[in-house]
Amino acid sequence: MEDQKTGALRLLLAPEEYLKIIGFSLQNHLLSPEVRVPGGNEAEHRIWRRWKKSGSLTEHAATRIRAAVAAKLDKTIPLPDEVELEKWRQGPQAEKFGRMGEWFHWSCLLKDFAPKPDFAPETAGLIEDLATASESLNRIAKEKGPKHFAKELRRHEDPDLKMILEASARAVETSNSGEYRSAMAPVHVFSCAVLVLGFLAEREGDRAEAVRKINLLLHGEKERAGPKLALARWLEIVKREMGFRTNQELFEALDPDLDENARIEWQKILAGKRMPPISNLDSALLRCRERLPMKNSLFHGLENCLWYHAFVARSVAYLDKHGHSDWAEEIFSRAGSFMVRHLEASG
């Protein structure tokens, strides 16, 4: 549970917060959408909401949630409640992993957005460094206050982070507690972007190909350049991989009930004027798969690609919402530069 006053004063938000940014409901994913009828799952959703509000679960409530998750996903997954996180921090693995237990936990759940938990040493080290620094800074904010937190932000000398941290430090110093999330939004997006790029690089294996994929994801090419058009680039990838000749064919495949209003909405996505939740686009891809022949490898490749592109595009909308519309290009450019340096250093 995030402390209302200082919870946003950290480098990384909780993984679930980033899922909200891209329009993915972890609650619905784990429990299925809420059904308020006899025999439905209203009680489990009520328990989940209470857990998120209070930060704790009774043993009975945790057992009920675990059973619901196991039934939905056909596997048993421990919930990262406060007791378990505390055990993680104090256990024998604490010295090795610091405060990144929650990130490793959720990696089991989040498709390709956070891949397999047995990360390569370079990726594990990256998560550890960011998560440990994030929690250390948040502890300073809780114990000494926002001004000390801002002072600590300024101590970081990384060339790709320094300007972003300085801007957020100034914003924190002039904000009240209700504005800290907005003040820290550039840092939160940068930090998660670094992790997402790390996951992408790990999947590629070859460093040169990883750098190429990172640049395409963040910047695109001349016709659809910039992070704002990331979802437009994803639609172009679907169009190319599925062999559609026109945008109309693409839209009809993704939306079998396509009418003029729907066509206009799809055109807005191509123009970067609309960035729908990832759940909407994932459902459209599933509809396309149901109607047209598509190999499993192609479907999963397009779905994984969607997660990366949705994070970039929806993060642009998130920055705009918090008053940082001019920062997106700079943040993603610096995140890309940071990751390239990380790849070069890791050999």
Image (spheres, rainbow, N blue to C red):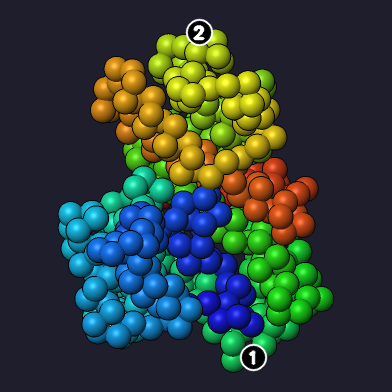
CB atoms at circles 1 and 2 under 8 Å apart? no
| Mark linked to residue 245 | 2
Compared with 256, 337 (above or below) is below
Mark whose residue sits in front, 1 or 2: 2
10 Å crowding of disc 1: few (<14), some (14-19), many (20+) = few
Q: In the displayed structure, does residue 66 sit left or right of residue 287?
A: left
Secondary structure beneath label 1:
helix
Residue that mark 1 sits on: 144
Mark closest to the chain's N terminus, 1 or 2: 1
Residue at the bottom extreme of this rendering: 143
Q: Going by the picture, which residue comes out furthest to the right? A: 174
Query: In the image, what residue occupies the spot 72% across and 51% down?
Result: 320
Q: Amino acid at mark 2?
A: Arg
Instruction: Identify the residue at horizontal 27%, vertical 77% (top origin).
Output: 62
- Residues 258 and 271: in front is 258
Q: Is residue 313 above or below residue 25?
A: above
Dot 1 amino acid type: Lys
Residue 261 location, x and y as percent? 64, 26
Q: Is 112 situated above or below 153?
A: above
